[in-house]
Amino acid sequence: MSSPARIPAISVFLPSHNEEGNVERVVRSYLAELPRVADDFEIIVVDDGSRDRTGEIAERLAAEDSHVKVVRHHVNKGYGGAVISGIRAATKQYVLLCDGDGQFDPSDLERLTPFVPEYDVVAGHRVRRADSLIRRINGKAWTILVRVLLGITISDIDCGFKLFKREKLEGMDLRAHGAMISTELMARLAGRNAKVIEVEVKHLPRLTGEQSGANLKVVARAFKELIALYRELKDERRARE
């Protein structure tokens, strides 16, 4: 079996809200995987105001291994807030966003690393989503909508498994605090002429914990933030003309 393509250094950040049943398994999986693909690495657990033992478990893991760091929100800031904190906390040359719910296989990072440094963003594409039918339908409809409004071409906009060059993220003014963060992130990267490729990855069933993506408040916030972003980008295009 050939060795995976290696990168110099990587920050992996895990947005996590009420993931006490997943956080230790996910962190330990990355501790086993990352030495295979990187010479230097850090794992950042972003505890987004969890009401369970997510933060406590993460702090214990950090005390056991210096590669693990913890960012804690005292109140829940939403998925977007957790992603923003993870990006700001990352210090290595490459940055991997991976949702902390255990639905992505850390070994799939080996599918992404061969495409750097040629690409600025290597975005995961879930071949078969391990979600309910309604979540899959909503996800497809959302992707079509943002492709039409914002001209984003990737086919799985909300996949929570993406590898970035950190230099492309520096100084980025991200504002979405809900599920719209993935769309905003890719739209602003497009504005920076980031070179993007999609790579197929596995999507695993959630073993424990609850999903919040179909929550009506989450959906309403996403549409509100999408409209605001569309108007902002439209005004920026007009100003350049």
Image (cartoon, rainbow, N blue to C red):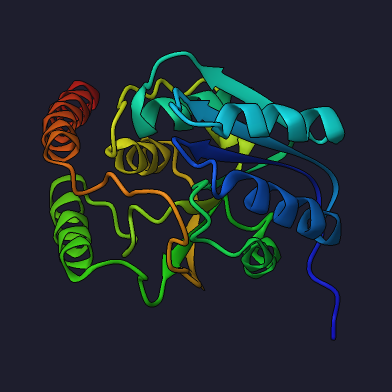
Q: Where 135 falls versus 87 (above or below)?
A: below
Residue 156, horizontal then vertical, whole percent: 33, 61
Residue furthest out toward the top: 74
Residue furthest out toward the bottom: 1
Q: Is 224 or 20 nearer to us in this picture? A: 20
* Residue sitting at x 43%, y 61%: 206
Residue 128, horizontal then vertical, whole percent: 37, 77
* Residue sitting at x 24%, y 25%: 240
Q: Quadrant of the N terminus?
A: bottom right
* Residue sitting at x 46%, y 68%: 203
* 127 sits to left or right of 123: left
* 169 sits to left or right of 51: right
Q: Quadrant of residue 182?
A: top left
Q: Quadrant of the C terminus?
A: top left
* 140 sits to left or right of 32: left
Say if residue 90 shows up in the picture: no
Say if residue 214 shows up in the picture: yes
Residue 87, horizontal then vertical, whole percent: 55, 30
